[in-house]
Image (tube, helix red, strand yellow):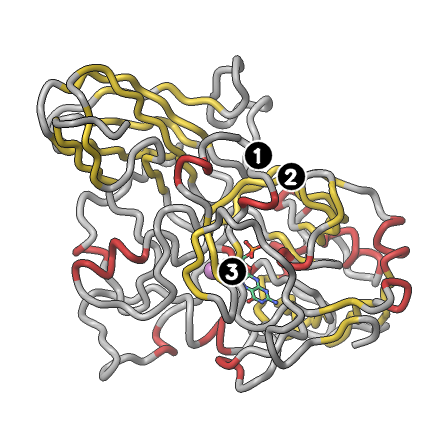
Amino acid sequence: MPGLRAPSDYKEDPPRHPALVVNSKEPFNAEPHRLALVSSYVTPVDFFYKRNHGPVPIVDDIGKYSVSITGLIQNPKELYMKDIRKLPKYNVTATLQCAGNRRTAMSKTRKVRGVGWDISAIGNAVWGGAKLADVLHLIGIPKFSNITPSGGKHVEFVSIDKCKEENGGPYKSSIPLSQATNTEADVILAYEMNGETLNRDHGYPLRVIVPGVIGARSVKWLDSINIIAEECQGFFTQKDYKMFPPSVNWDNIDWSTRRPQMDFPVQSAICSLEEVNTIKPGKINIKGYAVSGGGRGIERVDVSIDCGKTWVEASRYQKTGIPYFSDDESSDKWAWVFFEAEADIPESTEIVAKAVDITGNVQPENVEVIWNLRGILNTSWHRVQVQIGQSNL
Ligand SMILES: Nc1nc2c(c(=O)[nH]1)N[C@H]1C(S)=C(S)[C@@H](COP(=O)(O)O)O[C@H]1N2
Ligand SMILES: [Mo]
């Protein structure tokens, strides 16, 4: 692991913005306030959620840093930053969402295990870097490959951070070779975030970005890329980030019965209001984000101000002044969409939002039906309470 070093404690973790809500200090897990989240389409780096499983790695000499590409290929290779920077550079606007986003709300039904996230374990950034398809092409794997001549079917990304879930070993995960070599899937080895050099919390010097897929597959602090026959056998691919039915508990769980989660389902949340609000009667602004996995656009966002009895359609946009159309060339395919609606609130009520993606997938009404012991993928209708009274808004 030339050039990249993994500390065993948190003394050398980077400084963070004081406005972040810290869910866990060591390892550092934090998210912005919901209002901050919808104040800009591209999330500023400081306010982008941070999800670490161990101390943040350190680069002592960037000139010495390289990524090794090994496994079921003819010629294993070491790639330095200069080799990666020589490849065509792409800027991909993509929303990263932790599978545990909105876990706290799921925990209220029945206890779940995991970091307690509110609704902001999500962010949208412009990721600059080389396409993984180009990197793999460089080492002799053709674009749009399903298998290498020696039987490689998956691409494993290995970091160097020391994670307790891996008994002190590094974070790792994998994606199918077909996705990795598909230029349209836009899988990026990113060295920039929002036009700046990637910072330490987000994976400096190099991380993977797998658009449309749960954040867990976007491995930070990349140390090696392995072409393998079976999917990654590590903890975060085999014993975590899988969706189980509500009947499965910690006594009867059999991890091997489920596939690792990849695409995330359609999601939306109201960010202009807290969970419980006290307002004066009159007009309020209902604003939030909506996003779906796999590059599926957002077809519609419905808002209700009477607990879900009747609905109005919210307006949608990515860039101010430009109307959003799902599947249009002018839209950012991998990015979230903001929605907005104005409503008159005469009495205390529950305000609800639900999004529909281009496939017609819609968020489930209740959290109970999607409850799972790890508390992942809470995409149930987002509900906030408003009470009429002395205003705090
Ligand atoms: N090496 C490494 N990569 C990682 C993680 C990690 O702990 N170590 N966390 C993963 C998870 S679960 C998520 S949600 C995203 C979070 O990325 P961010 O901290 O840049 O928001 O990184 C992923 N990649
Ligand atoms: Mo995550």
Rounded to the nearest angstrom, the CA distance separating label 3 from label 1 is 18 Å
| Image spot of residue 348 (x, y percent) | 10, 28
- In the rendered image, the vertical position of residue 305 relative to residue 47, given as above or below: above
Q: Which mark is residue 42?
A: 1
| Mark 3: secondary structure | strand
Mark 1: C-beta under 8 Å from nearest atom of ligand 1: no
Q: Earlier in the sequence, mark 1 or mark 2?
A: 1
Give the amino acid at mark 2. Val
Task: Classify residue 11 as left or right of residue 86.
Answer: left
Which residue bears the numbered disc 2?
126
Task: Classify residue 61 as left or right of residue 275.
Answer: right
Q: Residue at x 84, y 67 (%)?
A: 65
Q: Residue furthest bottom?
A: 167
| Image spot of residue 40 (x, y percent) | 52, 30
* Disc 1 residue crowd, few under 14, some 14–19, many 20+, Cα 10 Å: many
* Disc 3 residue crowd, few under 14, some 14–19, many 20+, Cα 10 Å: many
| Mark 1: secondary structure | loop
Which residue bears the numbered disc 3?
51
Give the amino acid at mark 1. Val
Residue 90 appears in the rendering? yes
Mark 3: C-beta under 8 Å from nearest atom of ligand 1: yes
- In the rendered image, the vertical position of residue 125 relative to residue 59, given as above or below: above
Residue 146 appears in the rendering? no
The reply to whether dot 3 and dot 1 touch (C-beta < 8 Å) is no
The reply to whether dot 1 and dot 2 touch (C-beta < 8 Å) is yes
* Disc 2 residue crowd, few under 14, some 14–19, many 20+, Cα 10 Å: many
